Image (cartoon, helix red, strand yellow):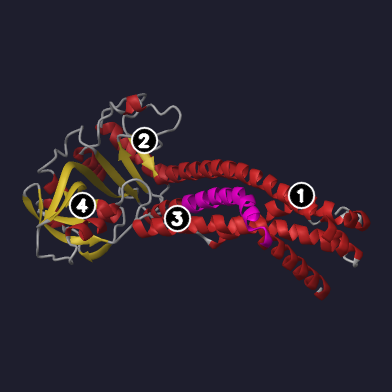
Amino acid sequence: MKKWFIKTTESFNLAWRFLLGNKLRSLLSILGITIGIFCIVGVRAFTSSLEGNIKSNIEKLGDNVIFVQKWPWGFGKKNYEWWQYMRRPEPTLKEMKALKTLGRKEIIDKVALSMNIPNSNLKNGKFYLSGVQVKGVSYDYFDVLKKELLIGRFPSNFEQKFGKNVCILGYNLAVGLFPKGFDPKKPIKYKGQKLFVIGILEKEGQSFGASADDECYLPLNYGRKFVNARSRKKRKEIIVKGKNEVPIKLVEFEINRIMRSERRLKPLDDINYAVNKLTSFSQTLSSTFLIINLVAGIIGGFSLLVGGFGIANIMFVSVKERTTLIGIQKALGAKNNFIRSQFLLESIVLTLFGGLIGIFLVWMLVYGIRKFSDFEVSLSLYTIIEGLILSASIGTIFGLIPAISASKLDPVQAIRSN
């Protein structure tokens, strides 16, 4: 074991000296490896972070939450009949109340309505935010979606019922409107009216689509002063939470029973609303990320293949340049394994170095995104190790033939080659 370690160390030292002696050639030869590892590791880091963020949000809500909306999830799928969905009416306040009162209590736990209010701007003195996503929400909305407060409280039943001018701010909105510190006694201005901030949500970060950090929530009855909640044209959604341990299919059946009755659909009529489940979204998400990783793997694989041929070419050149030295080493008693390991280690060191550069570039990109945006992305140790193993494998595969050819050289002919 000790003898093998000494020989391996000596081979590595020789390989390292030759690499340092040809810096430019070594750097150019690893360019393909660097690009390939950057593509594969980078995409893996971003997709795993995005998938992890979304799945954590889904797990937080639970698998018994259903969204009744106009549009079904999965835009971009084949056979997505958007022209038919456009003609669908939006869910209404009346339908939300029907689900709440007519739904069987042993199946449906809570029901909430969310209503978008367009063209919204918020102002606090000289601090002004335009294009803000403002929603009018019913009493159970925050409980159903398990929103958590950083400071303050949620609207009371009294404030909801009588439409009081209070609101909950997302984290980013609170920072934008109160950069010097939150003052609960100071109202903000919304559509020319005073609006008292009674709570600020904890920072959630960006995961997919809109973020709660950039949204402002009003009591539904206050929001109705600006948008007609009974209208079938204004964008709304009904959120239904089933009882724990109740199968999601049973909750869906109960929603369809009431919604079909409210919309007076005949037994054979197709539904004119969407029942969107988090479980189906999670399955679609997994298949989408699998395709993204596969595409990135193919692109990175081609780059690694080109880089591998470059490594093989450089190693053959290196063998030719050092033919005399190989002959002298063998004449002095160097075994074939020593010669072979010397060139194989040189090839592996080259590809590992290229992989490390690619991983470092990914780390720099991840650091920049985390510093200048709200998107939570991370480079896991598993992904780094996976990239290094892939780099070493390329070095082994494409450096093996040059290493074997070097070890089989005849010492006399090798010395005479000069």
Of callouts 3 and 2, which one flags the residue occurring earlier in the amino acid sequence? Answer: 2
What kind of residue is marked 1? Phe
Q: Amino acid at mark 2?
A: Pro
Q: Which residues are magenta?
A: 21-49
Q: Earlier in the sequence, mark 3 or mark 4?
A: 4
Res 13 → quadrant:
bottom right
- Residue 159: in sight, yes or no? yes
Which residue is the site of mark 4? 216
Whichever of labels 1 and 2 marks the residue nearer the N terminus, that label is 2
Label placed on residue 170: none
Q: Residue at x 19, y 61 (%)?
A: 199
Residue 94 place in picture, x, y as percent:
19, 38
Q: Give the Cα distance between marks 3 and 4.
A: 31 Å
**Residue topped by disc 1:** 316
Q: CA distance from mark 4 to mark 1?
A: 65 Å
How packed is label 2: few (under 14 Cα within 10 Å), some, or many (20 or more)?
some
Residue 171, horizontal then vertical, whole percent: 26, 59
Q: Quadrant of the N terminus?
A: bottom right
Q: CA distance from mark 2 to mark 4?
A: 25 Å
- Residue 48 is one of the magenta-drawn residues: yes
Looking at the rendered structure, the secondary structure element under dot 4 is strand
Check disc 3 and report its element: helix, strand or loop. Answer: helix
Q: Is residue 158 left or right of residue 16?
A: left
Residue under numbered circle 3: 365
Residue type for callout 4: Cys
Q: Which mark is residue 72?
A: 2
